[in-house]
Each structure stands twice: as structure tokens, then as C-alpha cells.
Amino acid sequence: MAASSSSAATAKQSDHSSPSEETEEESEFCPGFKDVDAFVKHGLGAVVSATKASAALPAAGDEFDLYRSFPAFQQFCASQGDRLLHCMTQIMQHHGCRSHMRDRNRLTGLEDRFDLVVDSNDAILEKVGILLDEASGVSRTQQPVMPAGYQPPKIVVSSWNRRGGERRDETFHLLHAKNIQRPQLKFKEKVDNSNTPFVSKIFIKPNAVKPLPSYSKLLPNERPEDLDVPAALADFIHQQRTQEHVDDMFSHPYQYELDHLVMPESLKCKPDVQMYKPLAESTCQFIYTLDDLVALNEKLAKVSEFAVDLEHHSYRSFLGITCLMQISTREEDFIIDTLELRSEMYILNETFTDPAIVKVFHGADSDIEWLQKDFGLYVVSMFDTHHAARCLNLGRNSLDHLLKVYCSVNSDKRYQLADWRIRPLPDQMLKYAQADTHYLLYVYDRVRADLYDMGNGQPTLIQQVWDKSRDLSLKVWTEHCNSPAWTEQELEQGDVKHDPKERARYSQC
Ligand code: AMP
Ligand code: MN
Ligand code: ZN
């Protein structure tokens, strides 16, 4: 923000320093700049030099203390700090954000001020997004989709849910709650939006055949860089260990187990199809306490398969957040509030990596990444019904299509793009989420039966789907990127594919 304001300030300055002719000025995009490109180029230059300059400042614990002992340096810091805060306050006020950056207790106010900046950045970026949507011709006048009786604080139509011209009437709308508390604020561990490579969050490895490398086994507060030793020594230990274990750190923690995974015998014969319970008669437990999560994990440990799905929110937020996890056994449905239990979700690794329990997903590409990124969860023994549908040449491979073909259920994908951070979740959204896994084990039986028949009474095709699913679970989330990864399935059923620009934007990162 400081950098962009300085570019604005320079823009003003160049207006004074280079008087241009009346006619030229009229055609200028803004004073001193002939078009948007010139402005952006100048702005970027300013941002780069500001970043370079701030990187060159002495860091805390480095030479900073030495510099601080000079009164002139202290005064300079104080005056520059005030200037920056003033500048930021003005920008925030201009955008109608909360903006009491100054006159705060310098010690206790820091975190508050940081939150203010983060909130303002969100608000400003959201405005930019809306303007970009408008510029690319997205109308925001149509009625939003929302549960009956639910009062959405604000509706935003995103560019990614735009339909092609001929199907405009079916445009999906994003139910976006503007005034909800940002769930990130509650997380015990801060969201890492940095560009550094992602290091696996796993620190205990249930169902291990090959144990975890020693580095990962250390609890976060036991790592040398977090210990109470001089910074230089911690850095040294860290570098040594990092170099030693660099391969381990970025590899899949269950690589060995997945490489040696064998398809369970029970999948090699034609399954007995087990009917699902009617959705209306099924119980669905909402899980938001650690005790209930532990109890669920214990229940899951006793079954031979369960279905899993996730709901994620990535609208204009940097890496996105997994907001819900739906799980269905043959008997019951569960919805886990993963915003509440984010730091505890890892306990499910016990069942998620148990090779004797099959985890059924539909189109798990993104799910596998979200599980790793947000919870440090991995999946061993997965069956992806999307790959089964592809193998069966069903024409369309979306879950809606499978539900139509096998369950005669007309699923309603209206809430797919809803803002899943909303709490308490309206009943209709909970029902929608429940339906995403409720029928999945039945679909799993049906596709396996069809694959078996199509393979002339041999499990060859089931094995193919199994292998594809295993390859999928080997996916490693390593890099931070700004856009969500889109699966073929999402591209197929979404609108992204209609627009080459959007497609490029959402291409696998
Ligand atoms: P699903 O597996 O269909 O329940 O989708 C899981 C999550 O993926 C949703 O909560 C959305 O965040 C995201 N998603 C799925 N399909 C789309 C789409 N067509 N456009 C944008 N986001 C999508
Ligand atoms: Mn899904
Ligand atoms: Zn879903």
C-alpha cells in the first residue's frame, strides 16, 4: 500500500515537473501518464524499488540494534514511520475502510494495526475484482441463489461462474457473506501466504511402513530455529538439517506406502450393491469439537470404506480455505467444521492413511491438495468415482451425472459456489453438503459392478481406476500459487472451459 501511494505521489509530482500541452493533457489517462500501461509500468517500478529498499534495511537481531543506538537513526525511523502510517490511513479512508493506524499504543497496537491492513487489503482487492468483473461485462443485477429465508449480507457474481452467451439464464451466483468474521483470525497457526516452498505439516505418521524422516518428526517448537539458542546457531543447525533432508522434506510422506500399495482382495470380485438410505431419513452430525472428531475417527476405524468430500472457499482470497469436510459411512453422514477444527484435523490421518479402509472421493484432484495444504492430511487407499466414470465412458463424468444415472437423483449444484465460511450454516447448505457424500458409497458399488462386467468378469478395469486414484493421492502440494488448481472434471462441469482466458488463469499451477 505504501508503495502504491508513493507511485501516486510521484504521479502528482511529475504533473508539476513536466508541464505538457493542453491537448496532450486531455488525452492523458491521468496526469503525467498517457495510458494505463505507462501508469502500471511506473507503479511497478515504484513497488520494486520500495521492496528493494525495505529488504536492504537492517533486520531485527541483525545490525538493527547497533543502528538503533544512534539518535539520528531513531528520529529518522520515527518520522518515516509516521509518514507511512499517515499515507496508509489516507488510502484506507479513501476506500472507506476502518483506519485508526496512528495514535495507538505502539506495543499492543501492532497486531491490531496489522489486522487493519489485512482487512483493508481484502476490501481493496475485492473492489478491484468487482471492477474487473464489470469491465469484462459481468452483470450484477440478476437475483442471487440463496437458501429460502436467508438474508445474505452481500452478493457478488464472480467472473469464474459466468456462463457462455446462450445459457445466461443459468448463471450461478456466488453467495458471498461480506460481513462474516474472517475465519483465518481464529486459526491457531497463521495462514502462510508466502512464496516459500510448502513443507509438509505432518509430524506424526500413522500406518507408517517407512518411518518419517527425523526432521519432520520434530514438533514445531522443537525445531532448532524455534529453540532458545542464538539466532546464528539456530540458522546454522537449520541449514545443516535442511540440506541433509531437503529431498525428504519435499517428498510425499506416504510415497513408500503408496508405491507398495496393493488393491484389497475385496475389490477384485463383483461387489454386492448396498442401497443407500433415503437422504431425508439419514442423520447428519455436525462436528465442531475435538471430542466429536476423535469419536468420529474411532467410528471410521471400524468400517471398510467411507466417502469424503470438501467444500473450499477461494473467492479472491489468496490460497483459499477448506471450510467443510463431509464424510459418509454406510450408516451415517457427518459434516466437520474444518474452520473450527483446522489444527486438529490431522488426527484423521489414522484412518485416512489406513490401507485397509477405502476412501471414496469424486474428482479428488483439488481435495488431495487442500487436505495437505490446510490439515497435513494424506490419503492411502483411495477410489475416485470420477476416474471410474471416465473408464466406463459415461459421456459426462460429473457427480451430478452419476447421481442421475445410478440414483435417479436430480442434484442441485446451486450452492457449489456459495460462501462456505458462513456460520451457522443455513440448513439448505448443510443438506446440499450432506448430499455430496451421502450417495457416494452406493455409486462406488455400482461403478465397480459395471467395471467388473465391462472387464468381462475380470477386475482389470477396477485395478486401472485404483491405480489412477493412487497416482492422484501421490500428488504433492509444494508450491504456493495465487490461483486454484482446476481439475479436468471441474473444467468439464464448470464454465471455466468456455473462456480461454479464464482457463489459462485457472490452469494447474
Ligand atoms: P465439489 O467437489 O463439487 O463439492 O466442489 C468442491 C469445491 O470446489 C467447492 O466448494 C468450490 O469451492 C470449488 N468448485 C467446484 N466447482 C467449481 C466451479 N465450477 N467453479 C468454481 N469453484 C468450484
Ligand atoms: Mn469434491
Ligand atoms: Zn462438495
Image (spheres, rainbow, N blue to C red):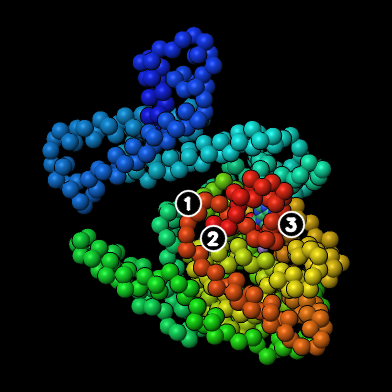
Q: Say which residue appears at 47% left-offset and 63% top-offset.
A: 478
Quarter of the image for the C terminus: give it.
Answer: bottom right
Which is more toward the observer, 299 or 136? 136
Alpha-carbon neighbours of circle 3 within 10 Å: few (<14), some, or many (≥20)? Answer: some
Q: Is residue 11 above or below residue 254?
A: above
Quarter of the image for the N terminus: give it.
Answer: top left
Dot 3 falls on a residue whose secondary structure is: helix
**x, y (%) of residue 358?**
65, 80
- Residue position for label 2: 340
Q: Is residue 332 above or below residue 356?
A: above
Which is more toward the observer, 320 or 114? 320
Specify whether tag 3 is near ligand 1 (CB below 8 Å).
yes
Give the label, 3 or 1, closer to the camera: 3
Dot 2 falls on a residue whose secondary structure is: loop
Asked if the residue under mark 2 is in contact with the one under mark 3, i.e. CB atoms within 8 Å, the reply is: no
Q: Say which residue appears at 72% left-offset and 53% top-offset.
A: 494
**x, y (%) of residue 92?**
46, 32
Mark nearer the N terminus (3 vs 2): 2
Which is more toward the observer, 409 or 17? 17
Visible residue check, residue 164:
yes
**x, y (%) of residue 155?**
67, 40
Residue flagged by tag 3: what amino acid is it? Gln
Alpha-carbon neighbours of circle 2 within 10 Å: few (<14), some, or many (≥20)? Answer: some
- Residue position for label 1: 185
* Relative side of 496 to 322, left or right: right
Q: Is residue 85 above or below residue 417?
A: above
Visible residue check, residue 273:
no
* Relative side of 125 to 140, left or right: left
Which is more toward the observer, 160 or 346? 160
Q: Say which residue appears at 42% left-offset and 30% top-offset.
A: 42
